[in-house]
Amino acid sequence: MSLIELENPNAPISIHFKMDGPSFADGIPLHLLTDSLSDVQSLLDKSYLGLTQRKRLSRDDRSRYYLLSKDIKHGSAETDFGVVLTGIQTAFPFFSALGPSGLWEYTKQSFDFLKFVYSAMKAGKQPTYSWSGDNSQFQVNTGDQTNVYNAPVFNIGQMSVNNYASLAKPIEEKFLDYISVGDPNVGAIRLDASNADVFSLPSQIETTPLKLKCEIFDFNKFDNIGKLYVYPGEIAKEGDYRFQVIGDQNISQYIEAMLRKQVSVNCLREIAPNPFSPEKIIRFQIINVEP
């Protein structure tokens, strides 16, 4: 795996975080602060996972790697993060050539990559990808521009996009003016009114029903939403999906369905444009469920 080359990768870095907007006039709304801090932590986590080729952080991982804040300033919400990496070099030797600076550099590159491909989708251009012979880099072409990135950026970007969408939502809803992570010394990730909607691609519901064999493993009876697992060999690709029940159906059948290993659902696909593939299933709209 090709890594970004840095002059002093293990030097300590300080990442400045700041968010401000109308909601901060009388103090700091804790839900906005905690949600945003959690998303920022997740962005660095996704870089860590992408570089270590892991799916989730273990307790041992968290003891070796975390963000550290000394204080949070009021007025706006503002603090400085240090990236702590201890004992990582033993578990993942390549981190000695990466360090805190490298972790942050990959996070920034992934943000730039996502802005590039999602902006292309907004303009009606489907990005295409090609990889170098040793798979250390990839090119993204949008028809009128081509950018080159280090290979880990592709997976890190895909894992991170939901966190960026979550960070952008209170800006789109006018609760915040901006969120900034970083500063001129280390580079910055900034979301504001000019780019907060870049990750919002409108979905559409298809009109042709599908019948799928699946397992319903989660259901919220108050919101009529849940999650299901589609079995191999079905029209839709195997995997976990969200679903929403259409209309005023008897919800008891969905609660009972969770007791069964397999049920059939008649449903409509809700899809959205996707910069990584021709389309993405957002959720299934369930017409009815059968034993």
Image (spheres, rainbow, N blue to C red):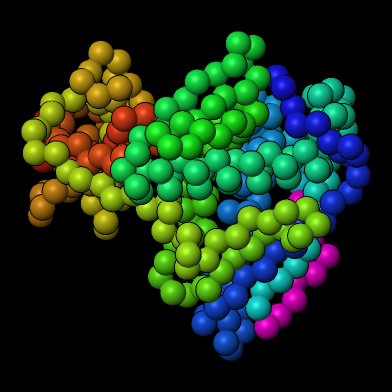
Viewer-side residue, 225 vs 160: 160
Give residue 73's position: percent from left, percent from top. Answer: 75, 76
Q: Residue at x 62, y 84 (%)?
A: 27
Asked if residue 131 lies left or right of residue 75, the reply is left
Asked if residue 273 lies left or right of residue 165, the reply is left
Q: Residue at x 55, y 18 (%)?
A: 131
Q: Is residue 196 visible?
A: yes
Give residue 161's position: percent from left, percent from top. Answer: 49, 44
Give residue 112's position: percent from left, percent from top. Answer: 58, 45
Q: Is residue 115 magenta?
A: no
Give residue 54's position: percent from left, percent from top. Answer: 63, 27
Give the position of the N terminus as an image quadrant: top right
Give the position of the C terminus as an image quadrant: top left
Position above or below: 136 against 79: above
Q: Residue at x 57, y 24 (%)?
A: 138
Q: Residue at x 67, y 73 (%)?
A: 77
Position above or below: 31 against 126: below
Corner quadrant of residue 275: top left
Kindly report the secondary structure that dominates the magenta region of the rendered protein.
loop
Q: Is residue 152 visible?
A: no
Q: Residue most toward the front?
A: 144
Corner quadrant of residue 65: top right
Q: Residue most toward the top?
A: 133
Give the magenta range: 67-75
Viewer-side residue, 208 vs 249: 208
